[in-house]
Image (cartoon, rainbow, N blue to C red):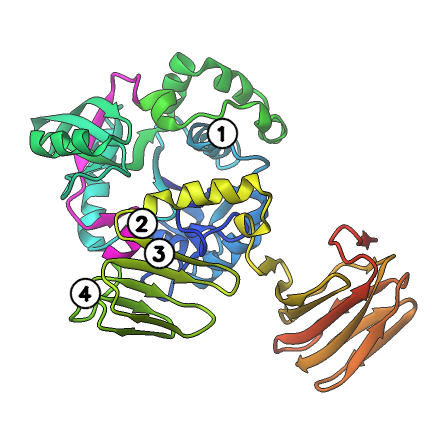
Amino acid sequence: MKVVILAGGGGTRLFPLSRPSFPKQFLKIDGENSLLGQTVARFLSRVEAKDILVVTNQEYLYHVQSELADCGASDAHVILEPIGRNTAPAIALAVKYCTDVLDCNHNEVIFVSPADHVIRSGKEFLQCVDFAITLARRDKLVTFGILPSKPETGYGYIEAEEKNNNEYEVISFKEKPELALAKAYLKAGNYYWNSGMFAFTIGLMLAELNRYQPEIVKLLEADYEKVIGNFGAMPNISIDYAIAERSTSVMMVPLTCYWNDIGSWDAIYEVLEKDEAGNSLDGDCLAVDCKNSLFMGRDRLIVGIGLDDILLVETNDVIVAAKKGESQKVKDVVDELKRHNRKEAYEHTTLYRSWGNTSLLGEGSSYRMKKIHVKPGGKLSLQMHYHRSEHWIVISGTAKVTMGEEVHLIHENESVFIPQNVKHRLENPGKIPLEIIEVQNGSYIGEDDIVRFD
């Protein structure tokens, strides 16, 4: 069996914590590991790391590699999509990788899981996985359904009918419903939340793609590198629309353990621990005479007084406050920010790179101040700026600084000035992280004023 983990989504429903520059799957919500890390760890008792494939966006390569290293799965394969094309092309690309790169035959079972769900009772979950694999080996396209506990409007639904012991035939897939319809689904008793997980053999998936999505199969006929090069020509379509809703081979296994796709701040509130007043406090928070509320702080003290059923989330550049039950509208807020081209809609003030990260501390019309963290052995590109100079102050560690033909070692409490039009590079030659404060000054400080030489 090969496990395919889909980790390419940009995630806006958990704004402001989740943004395209650092989306939901990399957040640490209910433990020390990220959601991606928890997903990988969930399968390591069934497969080796070399049997796990993570499909993600090119921009998230270093995030994924870091998370895989943290959970002891550095041997997992990382498949990079050059452009986002939804779950059907992502799964097709993973199948192509399995056949061409890993030499899997058509009887190989693939288990597909999103990277950003919370699942508890791992033993019970794996028992359901084992059963799904048994059905998949009978040439079935298997999905997991969750018996709803409330009339949820944020999930798609599966209409299913039990045929044998714990084997359910899928009748139809339903879109996210309005509240009245969700209540009807709950009352009917044979509608399940769609988990987004699937199990199938490579042979079955290729046959179903050939039957229902021949344009995808045509693109898969080339070798793997050409498929990557032509990936932008893939249709932007989900596996549900592309295959599951049309196939006559779909079976469903009820997932009996706790599951939550944490697709909203209301869902986050459900997941987190609460005090005796029903409040969930994460970060430096104080709740006075508050009930049934979520307070999540990241960079400053958050105080709530006399608040009930409130969701409040703070980062160093955005504060979001909402009534419980209204958090699905966060996506509308992000869309509005995008229409106004607000950078908050796309990125955090901390940006991650292969060598480390940068955090914006402050900026004005002719200056910008950042904190730069460089991993041991990390090295930035050799570059030059036409319109700005830079002043670097070492806070901790040792910096190796190249300026023109000269190389300097700059230690703690020392600084160096980088004039305009001078080629320069920053490196960390030491064994501990390097942290510096960078002050940029000039008539233009845009990020496109960087000329890179390597």
Q: Residues within 10 Å of mark 4 (few under 14, many from 20)?
A: some
Q: Residues within 10 Å of mark 1 (few under 14, many from 20)?
A: many
- Residue 180 lies in quadrant: top left
Sequence-earlier tag: 1 or 3: 3
Q: Which residues are magenta?
A: 245-270
Q: Which residue is mark 3?
A: 38
Sequence-earlier tag: 2 or 3: 3
Q: Which residue is mark 4?
A: 278
Q: Amino acid at mark 1?
A: Lys
The residue at the point 17 percent across, 69 percent down is 277
Q: Amino acid at mark 2?
A: Ile
Q: With respect to residue 155, does 422 lie above or below? A: below
Taking the view exactly as shown, the residue that stands out farthest to the front is 306
Find out whether the residues at labels 4 and 2 contact each other: C-beta distance under 8 Å. no
Across and down, in percent, residue 278 comes to: 19, 65
- Residue 256 lies in quadrant: top left
Sequence-earlier tag: 4 or 2: 2
Sequence-earlier tag: 1 or 4: 1
Q: Which mark is residue 96?
A: 1
Label 4: which secondary element: loop
Front disc: 2 or 3: 2
C-alpha separation, residue under disc 4 versus residue under disc 3:
26 Å
Whether 210 is among the magenta residues is no
Sequence-earlier tag: 4 or 3: 3
Residue 398 visible within the image: no
Q: Which residue is mark 2?
A: 262
The residue at the point 31 percent across, 16 percent down is 246
Q: Amino acid at mark 4?
A: Gly
Front disc: 1 or 3: 3
C-alpha separation, residue under disc 4 versus residue under disc 2:
18 Å
